Image: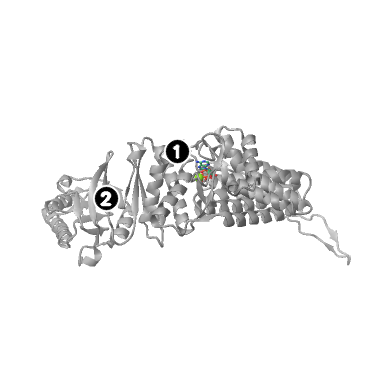
Protein backbone atom coordinates (compact mmCIF):
# COMPACT_ATOMS: atom_id res chain seq x y z
CA UNK A 1 0.00 0.00 0.00
CA UNK A 2 1.73 3.19 -1.19
CA UNK A 3 -0.81 5.57 0.33
CA UNK A 4 1.00 5.77 3.65
CA UNK A 5 0.07 7.85 6.67
CA UNK A 6 -1.57 11.19 6.06
CA UNK A 7 -0.87 14.30 8.06
CA UNK A 8 -3.10 17.26 8.76
CA UNK A 9 -1.53 20.71 8.31
CA UNK A 10 -2.56 23.67 10.51
CA UNK A 11 -4.68 25.03 7.64
CA UNK A 12 -6.60 21.80 7.49
CA UNK A 13 -5.03 20.40 4.32
CA UNK A 14 -4.13 16.75 4.38
CA UNK A 15 -0.69 16.06 3.01
CA UNK A 16 1.44 13.04 2.67
CA UNK A 17 4.86 13.69 4.21
CA UNK A 18 7.85 12.23 2.48
CA UNK A 19 9.69 9.97 4.82
CA UNK A 20 13.28 9.19 3.96
CA UNK A 21 14.17 5.96 5.52
CA UNK A 22 17.65 4.69 6.05
CA UNK A 23 18.32 1.73 3.90
CA UNK A 24 17.73 -1.63 5.40
CA UNK A 25 20.77 -2.84 7.24
CA UNK A 26 21.90 0.66 8.10
CA UNK A 27 23.29 0.67 11.57
CA UNK A 28 23.47 3.74 13.71
CA UNK A 29 24.85 4.00 17.16
CA UNK A 30 24.78 7.19 19.09
CA UNK A 31 25.86 9.06 22.12
CA UNK A 32 28.23 8.44 24.94
CA UNK A 33 28.18 4.68 24.48
CA UNK A 34 29.35 5.05 20.93
CA UNK A 35 32.09 7.48 21.93
CA UNK A 36 33.38 5.16 24.64
CA UNK A 37 33.37 2.24 22.25
CA UNK A 38 35.37 4.31 19.71
CA UNK A 39 37.92 5.16 22.39
CA UNK A 40 38.21 1.51 23.34
CA UNK A 41 38.77 0.48 19.74
CA UNK A 42 41.58 3.00 19.39
CA UNK A 43 43.21 1.88 22.61
CA UNK A 44 43.11 -1.72 21.42
CA UNK A 45 44.92 -0.78 18.22
CA UNK A 46 47.56 1.11 20.16
CA UNK A 47 48.16 -1.95 22.30
CA UNK A 48 49.24 -3.84 19.22
CA UNK A 49 52.17 -1.54 18.52
CA UNK A 50 53.20 -0.14 21.89
CA UNK A 51 55.79 -2.83 22.47
CA UNK A 52 57.73 -1.75 19.38
CA UNK A 53 58.72 1.65 20.84
CA UNK A 54 62.33 2.43 21.51
CA UNK A 55 65.71 0.75 21.17
CA UNK A 56 64.59 -2.25 23.22
CA UNK A 57 61.23 -2.48 21.51
CA UNK A 58 60.32 -5.71 19.82
CA UNK A 59 59.63 -6.13 16.15
CA UNK A 60 56.36 -7.38 14.74
CA UNK A 61 55.92 -10.10 12.25
CA UNK A 62 52.79 -9.43 10.23
CA UNK A 63 51.51 -11.87 7.70
CA UNK A 64 48.56 -11.38 5.45
CA UNK A 65 46.07 -13.84 3.99
CA UNK A 66 48.23 -14.27 0.92
CA UNK A 67 51.04 -15.54 3.10
CA UNK A 68 53.24 -12.48 2.63
CA UNK A 69 55.32 -11.91 5.75
CA UNK A 70 56.77 -8.62 6.86
CA UNK A 71 59.01 -8.06 9.84
CA UNK A 72 58.94 -4.50 11.01
CA UNK A 73 59.44 -2.10 13.84
CA UNK A 74 58.11 0.83 11.88
CA UNK A 75 54.84 2.13 13.31
CA UNK A 76 53.47 3.31 9.97
CA UNK A 77 54.29 0.04 8.24
CA UNK A 78 52.64 -2.07 10.92
CA UNK A 79 49.58 0.15 11.06
CA UNK A 80 49.16 -0.13 7.30
CA UNK A 81 49.45 -3.90 7.41
CA UNK A 82 47.04 -4.38 10.30
CA UNK A 83 44.00 -4.00 8.08
CA UNK A 84 42.05 -1.97 10.60
CA UNK A 85 38.36 -1.77 9.80
CA UNK A 86 37.03 0.15 12.75
CA UNK A 87 36.15 3.61 11.42
CA UNK A 88 37.40 5.57 14.42
CA UNK A 89 40.54 3.51 14.82
CA UNK A 90 41.34 4.16 11.17
CA UNK A 91 42.19 7.73 12.08
CA UNK A 92 45.21 6.30 13.92
CA UNK A 93 46.39 4.71 10.70
CA UNK A 94 46.03 8.08 9.04
CA UNK A 95 48.15 9.93 11.57
CA UNK A 96 50.85 7.26 11.41
CA UNK A 97 50.91 7.61 7.62
CA UNK A 98 50.99 11.36 7.73
CA UNK A 99 53.74 11.41 10.37
CA UNK A 100 55.64 9.09 8.05
CA UNK A 101 55.28 11.34 5.05
CA UNK A 102 55.72 14.63 6.89
CA UNK A 103 58.63 13.72 9.11
CA UNK A 104 59.68 10.15 8.38
CA UNK A 105 60.10 9.09 12.01
CA UNK A 106 58.05 9.07 15.19
CA UNK A 107 55.19 7.04 13.74
CA UNK A 108 54.96 4.75 16.75
CA UNK A 109 55.17 7.73 19.08
CA UNK A 110 52.28 9.54 17.42
CA UNK A 111 49.98 6.52 17.71
CA UNK A 112 50.92 5.79 21.31
CA UNK A 113 50.39 9.43 22.24
CA UNK A 114 46.96 9.55 20.62
CA UNK A 115 45.99 6.35 22.43
CA UNK A 116 47.09 7.82 25.74
CA UNK A 117 45.29 11.12 25.21
CA UNK A 118 42.13 9.09 24.62
CA UNK A 119 42.75 6.93 27.67
CA UNK A 120 43.04 10.09 29.79
CA UNK A 121 39.92 11.57 28.22
CA UNK A 122 37.80 8.47 28.76
CA UNK A 123 36.94 8.93 32.47
CA UNK A 124 35.80 12.49 31.77
CA UNK A 125 33.53 11.26 29.01
CA UNK A 126 32.16 8.57 31.30
CA UNK A 127 31.44 11.24 33.90
CA UNK A 128 29.38 13.10 31.34
CA UNK A 129 31.79 15.94 30.55
CA UNK A 130 30.95 17.41 27.18
CA UNK A 131 33.65 16.37 24.68
CA UNK A 132 33.96 19.92 23.38
CA UNK A 133 35.34 20.98 26.77
CA UNK A 134 38.00 18.32 26.69
CA UNK A 135 38.83 19.18 23.08
CA UNK A 136 39.24 22.86 23.86
CA UNK A 137 41.67 22.27 26.70
CA UNK A 138 43.60 19.48 24.98
CA UNK A 139 44.18 21.75 22.00
CA UNK A 140 45.42 24.51 24.28
CA UNK A 141 47.75 22.06 26.03
CA UNK A 142 49.12 20.78 22.72
CA UNK A 143 49.82 24.33 21.60
CA UNK A 144 51.70 25.05 24.81
CA UNK A 145 53.68 21.84 24.49
CA UNK A 146 54.67 22.67 20.92
CA UNK A 147 55.72 26.18 21.94
CA UNK A 148 57.82 24.68 24.69
CA UNK A 149 59.53 22.26 22.30
CA UNK A 150 60.46 25.22 20.10
CA UNK A 151 61.72 27.12 23.10
CA UNK A 152 64.02 24.45 24.49
CA UNK A 153 65.22 22.91 21.23
CA UNK A 154 68.87 23.50 20.44
CA UNK A 155 69.83 24.71 17.00
CA UNK A 156 72.83 23.20 15.28
CA UNK A 157 72.71 25.84 12.56
CA UNK A 158 75.91 27.67 13.37
CA UNK A 159 78.11 24.57 13.42
CA UNK A 160 80.90 23.97 10.88
CA UNK A 161 80.19 21.40 8.13
CA UNK A 162 82.24 18.73 9.92
CA UNK A 163 80.55 19.41 13.23
CA UNK A 164 77.19 19.44 11.53
CA UNK A 165 77.82 16.06 9.91
CA UNK A 166 78.76 14.70 13.29
CA UNK A 167 75.57 16.11 14.83
CA UNK A 168 73.41 14.77 12.03
CA UNK A 169 74.96 11.39 12.58
CA UNK A 170 73.80 11.46 16.21
CA UNK A 171 70.23 12.10 15.09
CA UNK A 172 70.43 9.26 12.58
CA UNK A 173 71.85 6.96 15.27
CA UNK A 174 68.95 7.71 17.59
CA UNK A 175 66.51 6.82 14.84
CA UNK A 176 68.35 3.63 13.96
CA UNK A 177 68.90 2.46 17.51
CA UNK A 178 65.34 1.19 17.73
CA UNK A 179 65.64 -0.86 14.56
CA UNK A 180 66.84 -4.26 13.49
CA UNK A 181 70.01 -2.63 12.16
CA UNK A 182 70.55 -0.96 15.55
CA UNK A 183 73.61 -3.10 16.20
CA UNK A 184 75.36 -1.36 13.33
CA UNK A 185 73.83 2.04 13.89
CA UNK A 186 77.10 3.96 13.66
CA UNK A 187 77.99 2.38 10.32
CA UNK A 188 74.56 3.00 8.83
CA UNK A 189 74.13 6.46 10.39
CA UNK A 190 77.36 7.49 8.68
CA UNK A 191 76.08 6.06 5.42
CA UNK A 192 72.83 8.02 5.69
CA UNK A 193 74.65 11.27 6.44
CA UNK A 194 77.06 10.69 3.55
CA UNK A 195 74.11 9.93 1.30
CA UNK A 196 72.30 13.14 2.20
CA UNK A 197 75.56 15.09 1.88
CA UNK A 198 75.93 13.97 -1.74
CA UNK A 199 72.56 15.50 -2.64
CA UNK A 200 72.03 18.97 -3.97
CA UNK A 201 71.78 20.79 -0.63
CA UNK A 202 69.09 23.16 -1.86
CA UNK A 203 66.79 20.48 -3.22
CA UNK A 204 67.62 17.53 -0.94
CA UNK A 205 65.52 15.35 -3.20
CA UNK A 206 65.27 11.91 -1.55
CA UNK A 207 64.48 10.31 -4.91
CA UNK A 208 68.07 10.93 -5.83
CA UNK A 209 69.11 8.37 -3.22
CA UNK A 210 68.71 4.96 -4.79
CA UNK A 211 68.44 1.83 -2.70
CA UNK A 212 69.46 -1.55 -4.11
CA UNK A 213 68.99 -4.74 -2.17
CA UNK A 214 71.32 -7.68 -2.74
CA UNK A 215 70.70 -10.82 -0.76
CA UNK A 216 73.68 -12.45 0.84
CA UNK A 217 76.69 -11.20 2.72
CA UNK A 218 76.45 -9.39 6.01
CA UNK A 219 75.00 -5.99 6.82
CA UNK A 220 78.49 -4.58 6.98
CA UNK A 221 79.05 -5.44 3.33
CA UNK A 222 76.52 -2.76 2.44
CA UNK A 223 78.05 0.24 0.75
CA UNK A 224 77.32 3.64 -0.66
CA UNK A 225 78.07 4.62 -4.24
CA UNK A 226 78.41 8.35 -4.88
CA UNK A 227 76.47 8.04 -8.09
CA UNK A 228 74.12 5.58 -9.71
CA UNK A 229 74.32 1.83 -9.35
CA UNK A 230 72.07 -0.79 -10.80
CA UNK A 231 71.93 -4.48 -11.29
CA UNK A 232 72.75 -5.79 -14.70
CA UNK A 233 69.72 -7.64 -16.01
CA UNK A 234 71.08 -9.78 -18.85
CA UNK A 235 74.46 -10.72 -20.20
CA UNK A 236 74.98 -11.78 -23.77
CA UNK A 237 77.76 -13.51 -25.64
CA UNK A 238 80.64 -11.15 -26.24
CA UNK A 239 79.90 -9.35 -23.07
CA UNK A 240 82.98 -10.63 -21.26
CA UNK A 241 85.23 -9.07 -23.87
CA UNK A 242 83.85 -5.63 -23.12
CA UNK A 243 85.96 -3.35 -20.95
CA UNK A 244 84.53 -2.94 -17.46
CA UNK A 245 86.22 0.25 -16.34
CA UNK A 246 86.27 3.73 -17.87
CA UNK A 247 87.39 7.15 -16.81
CA UNK A 248 85.38 10.11 -18.10
CA UNK A 249 83.36 8.04 -20.57
CA UNK A 250 80.54 9.50 -22.62
CA UNK A 251 77.21 7.86 -21.95
CA UNK A 252 74.51 7.20 -24.52
CA UNK A 253 71.01 6.39 -23.26
CA UNK A 254 68.56 4.77 -25.66
CA UNK A 255 65.00 3.69 -25.80
CA UNK A 256 65.72 1.61 -28.85
CA UNK A 257 66.09 -2.04 -29.66
CA UNK A 258 69.49 -3.19 -30.86
CA UNK A 259 68.55 -6.76 -31.57
CA UNK A 260 67.92 -8.77 -34.72
CA UNK A 261 64.42 -10.19 -35.10
CA UNK A 262 65.89 -13.64 -35.42
CA UNK A 263 67.55 -13.25 -32.04
CA UNK A 264 64.19 -12.86 -30.41
CA UNK A 265 62.27 -15.75 -28.97
CA UNK A 266 59.12 -15.55 -31.04
CA UNK A 267 60.42 -14.15 -34.27
CA UNK A 268 58.21 -15.07 -37.17
CA UNK A 269 58.55 -13.80 -40.70
CA UNK A 270 55.90 -14.91 -43.19
CA UNK A 271 57.03 -15.04 -46.77
CA UNK A 272 55.19 -15.86 -49.94
CA UNK A 273 58.34 -16.10 -51.98
CA UNK A 274 61.13 -18.04 -50.23
CA UNK A 275 63.79 -16.46 -52.46
CA UNK A 276 63.00 -13.16 -50.74
CA UNK A 277 64.24 -14.54 -47.43
CA UNK A 278 67.89 -13.64 -47.86
CA UNK A 279 66.95 -10.16 -49.00
CA UNK A 280 64.98 -9.54 -45.86
CA UNK A 281 67.74 -10.88 -43.65
CA UNK A 282 70.31 -8.74 -45.43
CA UNK A 283 68.16 -5.68 -45.09
CA UNK A 284 67.77 -6.25 -41.40
CA UNK A 285 71.50 -6.70 -40.94
CA UNK A 286 72.16 -3.53 -42.85
CA UNK A 287 69.76 -1.61 -40.66
CA UNK A 288 71.20 -2.83 -37.41
CA UNK A 289 74.83 -2.37 -38.53
CA UNK A 290 73.95 1.16 -39.49
CA UNK A 291 72.54 1.79 -36.03
CA UNK A 292 75.53 0.23 -34.28
CA UNK A 293 77.96 2.22 -36.36
CA UNK A 294 76.20 5.45 -35.46
CA UNK A 295 76.26 4.57 -31.76
CA UNK A 296 80.00 3.99 -31.82
CA UNK A 297 80.65 7.04 -34.01
CA UNK A 298 78.96 9.23 -31.41
CA UNK A 299 81.99 8.68 -29.22
CA UNK A 300 79.96 7.08 -26.43
CA UNK A 301 81.81 4.44 -24.42
CA UNK A 302 78.79 3.37 -22.40
CA UNK A 303 75.60 2.49 -24.24
CA UNK A 304 72.45 1.83 -22.27
CA UNK A 305 68.98 0.96 -23.43
CA UNK A 306 65.54 0.45 -21.95
CA UNK A 307 65.07 -2.22 -24.63
CA UNK A 308 67.06 -5.26 -25.59
CA UNK A 309 70.63 -5.17 -26.82
CA UNK A 310 71.23 -8.56 -28.44
CA UNK A 311 74.21 -10.82 -29.08
CA UNK A 312 75.22 -9.24 -32.34
CA UNK A 313 75.26 -5.72 -30.88
CA UNK A 314 77.06 -6.85 -27.74
CA UNK A 315 79.83 -8.46 -29.77
CA UNK A 316 80.04 -5.46 -32.09
CA UNK A 317 80.51 -3.09 -29.15
CA UNK A 318 83.00 -5.44 -27.48
CA UNK A 319 85.16 -5.43 -30.60
CA UNK A 320 85.26 -1.63 -30.45
CA UNK A 321 86.01 -1.28 -26.74
CA UNK A 322 82.53 -0.09 -25.88
CA UNK A 323 80.42 -1.20 -22.93
CA UNK A 324 76.68 -1.84 -23.26
CA UNK A 325 73.72 -2.87 -21.11
CA UNK A 326 70.17 -3.47 -22.29
CA UNK A 327 66.79 -3.90 -20.67
CA UNK A 328 67.39 -1.35 -17.94
CA UNK A 329 64.63 -0.74 -15.45
CA UNK A 330 62.84 2.51 -16.08
CA UNK A 331 63.85 4.01 -12.71
CA UNK A 332 67.50 3.07 -13.24
CA UNK A 333 67.62 4.68 -16.65
CA UNK A 334 65.94 7.81 -15.29
CA UNK A 335 68.51 8.15 -12.53
CA UNK A 336 71.43 7.56 -14.89
CA UNK A 337 70.18 10.17 -17.31
CA UNK A 338 69.51 12.69 -14.54
CA UNK A 339 72.94 12.08 -13.07
CA UNK A 340 75.06 11.94 -16.23
CA UNK A 341 73.08 14.45 -18.24
CA UNK A 342 72.38 12.00 -21.06
CA UNK A 343 69.11 12.49 -22.91
CA UNK A 344 67.19 9.38 -23.83
CA UNK A 345 67.21 8.84 -27.60
CA UNK A 346 64.69 6.91 -29.61
CA UNK A 347 66.76 7.09 -32.78
CA UNK A 348 70.49 7.11 -33.45
CA UNK A 349 70.31 9.52 -36.34
CA UNK A 350 72.00 12.86 -35.65
CA UNK A 351 73.63 11.91 -32.38
CA UNK A 352 75.75 14.71 -31.00
CA UNK A 353 77.62 15.59 -27.83
CA UNK A 354 74.68 17.43 -26.40
CA UNK A 355 72.67 14.25 -26.15
CA UNK A 356 75.41 12.31 -24.42
CA UNK A 357 76.09 12.26 -20.72
CA UNK A 358 79.27 11.66 -18.79
CA UNK A 359 80.64 10.61 -15.44
CA UNK A 360 84.02 10.58 -13.75
CA UNK A 361 84.29 6.81 -13.43
CA UNK A 362 82.26 3.93 -14.72
CA UNK A 363 82.83 0.38 -13.62
CA UNK A 364 81.14 -2.95 -13.47
CA UNK A 365 81.54 -4.70 -10.19
CA UNK A 366 80.52 -8.06 -8.76
CA UNK A 367 78.36 -7.78 -5.62
CA UNK A 368 77.38 -11.14 -4.18
CA UNK A 369 75.92 -13.03 -7.09
CA UNK A 370 74.99 -9.91 -8.96
CA UNK A 371 76.83 -7.69 -11.35
CA UNK A 372 76.47 -4.00 -10.69
CA UNK A 373 77.06 -1.09 -13.03
CA UNK A 374 78.37 1.90 -11.11
CA UNK A 375 78.47 5.48 -12.36
CA UNK A 376 80.54 7.63 -10.03
CA UNK A 377 81.16 11.35 -9.98
CA UNK A 378 78.21 12.39 -12.11
CA UNK A 379 78.21 16.04 -13.21
CA UNK A 380 74.60 16.82 -13.98
CA UNK A 381 73.01 16.03 -10.70
CA UNK A 382 73.99 14.86 -7.32
CA UNK A 383 72.85 11.39 -6.59
CA UNK A 384 73.96 8.31 -4.72
CA UNK A 385 72.95 4.71 -4.25
CA UNK A 386 72.91 2.53 -1.18
CA UNK A 387 73.62 -1.10 -1.87
CA UNK A 388 72.23 -3.10 1.03
CA UNK A 389 73.39 -6.57 1.90
CA UNK A 390 71.98 -9.09 4.34
CA UNK A 391 71.02 -12.68 4.84
CA UNK A 392 67.27 -12.71 4.38
CA UNK A 393 64.85 -10.82 2.22
CA UNK A 394 62.60 -9.60 5.04
CA UNK A 395 65.70 -8.43 6.83
CA UNK A 396 66.91 -6.32 3.93
CA UNK A 397 63.41 -4.94 3.42
CA UNK A 398 63.23 -3.82 7.04
CA UNK A 399 66.78 -2.43 6.86
CA UNK A 400 65.76 -0.37 3.83
CA UNK A 401 62.74 1.00 5.69
CA UNK A 402 64.86 1.89 8.70
CA UNK A 403 67.50 3.62 6.58
CA UNK A 404 64.73 5.49 4.88
CA UNK A 405 63.59 6.79 8.29
CA UNK A 406 67.13 7.83 9.12
CA UNK A 407 67.61 9.56 5.78
CA UNK A 408 64.38 11.47 6.30
CA UNK A 409 65.55 12.54 9.74
CA UNK A 410 68.89 13.72 8.42
CA UNK A 411 67.19 15.59 5.58
CA UNK A 412 64.82 17.35 7.99
CA UNK A 413 67.65 18.13 10.36
CA UNK A 414 69.70 19.70 7.57
CA UNK A 415 66.78 21.96 6.72
CA UNK A 416 65.49 22.56 10.18
CA UNK A 417 68.40 21.99 12.44
CA UNK A 418 66.84 22.02 15.88
CA UNK A 419 67.08 19.05 18.19
CA UNK A 420 65.72 17.93 21.55
CA UNK A 421 66.96 15.26 23.97
CA UNK A 422 65.25 11.87 23.49
CA UNK A 423 64.77 8.84 25.71
CA UNK A 424 61.67 10.43 27.22
CA UNK A 425 63.52 13.56 28.40
CA UNK A 426 61.61 16.01 26.25
CA UNK A 427 58.31 14.32 27.10
CA UNK A 428 58.96 14.54 30.86
CA UNK A 429 59.92 18.17 30.52
CA UNK A 430 56.78 19.03 28.59
CA UNK A 431 54.71 17.17 31.16
CA UNK A 432 56.29 19.15 34.00
CA UNK A 433 55.79 22.40 32.14
CA UNK A 434 52.08 21.72 31.62
CA UNK A 435 51.53 20.67 35.22
CA UNK A 436 53.14 23.90 36.40
CA UNK A 437 50.82 25.79 34.12
CA UNK A 438 47.77 23.80 35.22
CA UNK A 439 48.26 25.09 38.76
CA UNK A 440 47.51 28.58 37.51
CA UNK A 441 44.27 27.53 35.82
CA UNK A 442 41.00 27.67 37.74
CA UNK A 443 38.17 25.19 37.37
CA UNK A 444 37.89 22.14 35.15
CA UNK A 445 40.62 23.33 32.80
CA UNK A 446 43.16 22.32 35.39
CA UNK A 447 41.97 18.72 35.29
CA UNK A 448 42.16 18.50 31.51
CA UNK A 449 45.61 20.05 31.28
CA UNK A 450 46.85 17.71 33.98
CA UNK A 451 45.39 14.75 32.10
CA UNK A 452 47.20 15.84 28.95
CA UNK A 453 50.43 16.29 30.92
CA UNK A 454 50.09 12.83 32.41
CA UNK A 455 49.53 11.33 28.98
CA UNK A 456 52.87 12.68 27.75
CA UNK A 457 54.61 10.48 30.30
CA UNK A 458 53.53 7.46 28.29
CA UNK A 459 56.67 7.75 26.15
CA UNK A 460 59.25 7.28 28.95
CA UNK A 461 56.92 4.75 30.62
CA UNK A 462 56.67 2.66 27.49
CA UNK A 463 60.42 2.89 26.89
CA UNK A 464 60.91 1.52 30.44
CA UNK A 465 58.36 -1.26 29.99
CA UNK A 466 59.91 -2.28 26.70
CA UNK A 467 63.37 -2.40 28.26
CA UNK A 468 62.19 -4.47 31.21
CA UNK A 469 62.64 -1.83 33.90
CA UNK A 470 60.28 -0.74 36.63
CA UNK A 471 58.50 2.20 35.08
CA UNK A 472 57.02 3.54 38.34
CA UNK A 473 60.44 3.79 39.89
CA UNK A 474 62.09 5.40 36.88
CA UNK A 475 59.24 7.84 36.36
CA UNK A 476 59.45 8.96 39.97
CA UNK A 477 63.14 9.67 39.57
CA UNK A 478 62.54 11.52 36.32
CA UNK A 479 59.71 13.62 37.80
CA UNK A 480 61.95 14.61 40.70
CA UNK A 481 64.83 15.46 38.44
CA UNK A 482 62.71 17.58 36.12
CA UNK A 483 61.10 19.40 39.06
CA UNK A 484 64.42 20.01 40.79
CA UNK A 485 65.12 23.34 39.12
CA UNK A 486 68.60 22.08 38.29
CA UNK A 487 69.21 23.49 34.76
CA UNK A 488 70.34 20.17 33.26
CA UNK A 489 67.37 18.41 34.90
CA UNK A 490 65.31 19.17 31.81
CA UNK A 491 67.49 16.83 29.75
CA UNK A 492 67.04 13.76 31.88
CA UNK A 493 65.60 10.66 30.29
CA UNK A 494 65.85 6.92 30.53
CA UNK A 495 69.13 5.08 30.22
CA UNK A 496 67.94 1.98 28.41
CA UNK A 497 71.13 0.12 29.25
CA UNK A 498 70.93 0.12 33.03
CA UNK A 499 67.44 1.36 33.87
CA UNK A 500 68.81 4.50 35.50
CA UNK A 501 68.26 8.06 34.39
CA UNK A 502 70.75 10.24 32.55
CA UNK A 503 71.23 13.45 30.64
CA UNK A 504 70.27 12.17 27.20
CA UNK A 505 71.41 15.40 25.57
CA UNK A 506 74.92 14.75 26.84
CA UNK A 507 74.59 11.13 25.71
CA UNK A 508 73.75 12.36 22.18
CA UNK A 509 70.36 10.71 22.11
CA UNK A 510 68.89 13.39 19.95
CA UNK A 511 65.71 13.77 18.06
CA UNK A 512 64.81 16.54 15.64
CA UNK A 513 62.39 18.93 17.32
CA UNK A 514 60.17 18.53 14.28
CA UNK A 515 59.47 14.87 15.12
CA UNK A 516 58.04 15.85 18.50
CA UNK A 517 56.20 18.91 17.26
CA UNK A 518 54.46 16.97 14.55
CA UNK A 519 53.76 13.96 16.79
CA UNK A 520 52.12 16.03 19.53
CA UNK A 521 49.98 18.13 17.22
CA UNK A 522 48.90 15.20 15.07
CA UNK A 523 48.11 12.98 18.08
CA UNK A 524 46.07 15.77 19.64
CA UNK A 525 44.15 16.38 16.43
CA UNK A 526 43.35 12.68 16.04
CA UNK A 527 42.18 12.59 19.65
CA UNK A 528 39.90 15.58 19.11
CA UNK A 529 38.53 13.99 15.98
CA UNK A 530 37.62 10.79 17.80
CA UNK A 531 36.15 12.77 20.71
CA UNK A 532 33.96 14.80 18.41
CA UNK A 533 32.26 11.78 16.89
CA UNK A 534 29.33 10.51 18.87
CA UNK A 535 27.49 8.85 16.06
CA UNK A 536 28.51 6.32 13.52
CA UNK A 537 26.20 5.53 10.68
CA UNK A 538 26.98 2.44 8.77
CA UNK A 539 25.83 2.76 5.22
CA UNK A 540 25.39 -0.61 3.56
CA UNK A 541 25.81 0.99 0.14
CA UNK A 542 29.43 1.76 0.89
CA UNK A 543 29.92 -1.95 1.39
CA UNK A 544 29.46 -2.52 -2.29
CA UNK A 545 25.70 -3.09 -2.58
CA UNK A 546 23.96 -1.23 -5.36
CA UNK A 547 20.92 0.97 -5.42
CA UNK A 548 19.71 4.23 -4.00
CA UNK A 549 18.44 5.03 -0.54
CA UNK A 550 14.82 4.03 -0.40
CA UNK A 551 12.39 6.94 -0.50
CA UNK A 552 9.18 5.40 0.55
CA UNK A 553 6.43 6.09 2.96
CA UNK A 554 6.41 3.16 5.31
CA UNK A 555 8.64 0.21 4.72
CA UNK A 556 10.35 -2.48 6.63
CA UNK A 557 13.09 -2.62 9.16
CA UNK A 558 14.29 0.99 9.01
CA UNK A 559 15.07 2.84 12.15
CA UNK A 560 14.37 6.53 12.47
N1 LIG B 1 69.52 4.98 22.89
C1 LIG B 1 68.34 5.37 23.32
N2 LIG B 1 68.09 5.49 24.63
C2 LIG B 1 66.88 5.90 25.06
N3 LIG B 1 65.85 6.19 24.25
C3 LIG B 1 66.05 6.09 22.95
C4 LIG B 1 67.30 5.67 22.40
N4 LIG B 1 67.19 5.66 21.06
C5 LIG B 1 65.92 6.04 20.77
N5 LIG B 1 65.23 6.31 21.90
C6 LIG B 1 63.85 6.75 22.01
O1 LIG B 1 63.00 5.82 21.35
C7 LIG B 1 61.86 6.51 20.84
C8 LIG B 1 61.65 6.17 19.39
O2 LIG B 1 61.37 4.81 19.24
P1 LIG B 1 60.96 4.17 17.84
O3 LIG B 1 61.93 4.60 16.81
O4 LIG B 1 60.74 2.73 18.07
O5 LIG B 1 59.56 4.81 17.57
P2 LIG B 1 59.15 6.00 16.62
O6 LIG B 1 60.33 6.77 16.18
O7 LIG B 1 58.08 6.73 17.33
O8 LIG B 1 58.43 5.26 15.42
P3 LIG B 1 59.05 4.67 14.06
O9 LIG B 1 60.53 4.70 14.20
O10 LIG B 1 58.48 3.30 14.00
O11 LIG B 1 58.54 5.58 13.01
C9 LIG B 1 62.13 7.99 21.00
O12 LIG B 1 61.38 8.47 22.10
C10 LIG B 1 63.61 8.05 21.29
O13 LIG B 1 63.96 9.16 22.08
MG1 LIG C 1 61.99 5.88 15.18
Q: Residue furthest front?
A: 486
Q: Is residue 430 left or right of residue 393?
A: right
First along the sequence among labels 2 and 1: 1
Q: Dot 2, how many residues are within 10 Å of its Cα: few (below 14), some (14-19), or many (20+)? A: many
Q: Is residue 267 left or right of residue 131?
A: left
- Label 1 Cα crowd, 10 Å radius (few <14 / some 14-19 / many 20+): many
- Left or right: residue 450 versus residue 302 is right
Q: Position of residue 317 (x, y in %)?
A: 15, 53
Q: CA distance from mark 2 to mark 1?
A: 28 Å
The structure residue drawn at horizontal position 70% and vertical position 51%, both measured from the top left corner, is 436
Residue 257 visible (yes or no):
no
The correct choice, above or below, for 260 with respect to 50 in the image is: below
Pair 2/1: label in front: 1
Q: Give the image location of residue 421, x and y in percent.
A: 54, 48
**SS at mark 1 in the image:** helix
- Counting from the top left corner in percent of width and height, residue 481 is at 62, 43
Residue drawn 29% across the image and 51% down it: 328
Q: Nearer the viewer, residue 386 or 298?
A: 386
Where residue 181 appears, as percent x and y from the top left, is 42, 39
Residue under label 1: 180
Structure colour scheme: one colour
Is 485 in front, or is 348? 485
Q: How many marks?
A: 2
The residue tagged 2 is 374
Q: Is residue 45 above or below residue 291?
A: above
The answer to whether the beta carbon of the residue marked 1 is less than 8 Å from any atom of ligand 1 is no
Amino acid sequence: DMAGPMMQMPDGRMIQPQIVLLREGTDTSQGKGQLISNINACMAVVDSIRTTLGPRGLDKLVHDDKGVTTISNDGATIMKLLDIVHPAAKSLVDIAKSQDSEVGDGTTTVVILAGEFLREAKPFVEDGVHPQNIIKWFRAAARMAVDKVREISVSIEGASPEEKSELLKKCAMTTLSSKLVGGEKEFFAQMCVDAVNTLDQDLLDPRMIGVKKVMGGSMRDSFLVDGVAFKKAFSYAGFEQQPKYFENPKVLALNLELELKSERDNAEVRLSDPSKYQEIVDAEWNIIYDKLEKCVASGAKIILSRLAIGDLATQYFADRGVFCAGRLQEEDLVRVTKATGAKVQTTVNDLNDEQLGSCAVFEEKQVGNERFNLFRGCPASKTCTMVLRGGAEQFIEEAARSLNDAIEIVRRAVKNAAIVPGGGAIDMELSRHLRDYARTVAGKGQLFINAFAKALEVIPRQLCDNSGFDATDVLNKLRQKHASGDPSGANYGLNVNDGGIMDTYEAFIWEPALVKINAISAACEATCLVLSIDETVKNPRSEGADGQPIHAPGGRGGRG
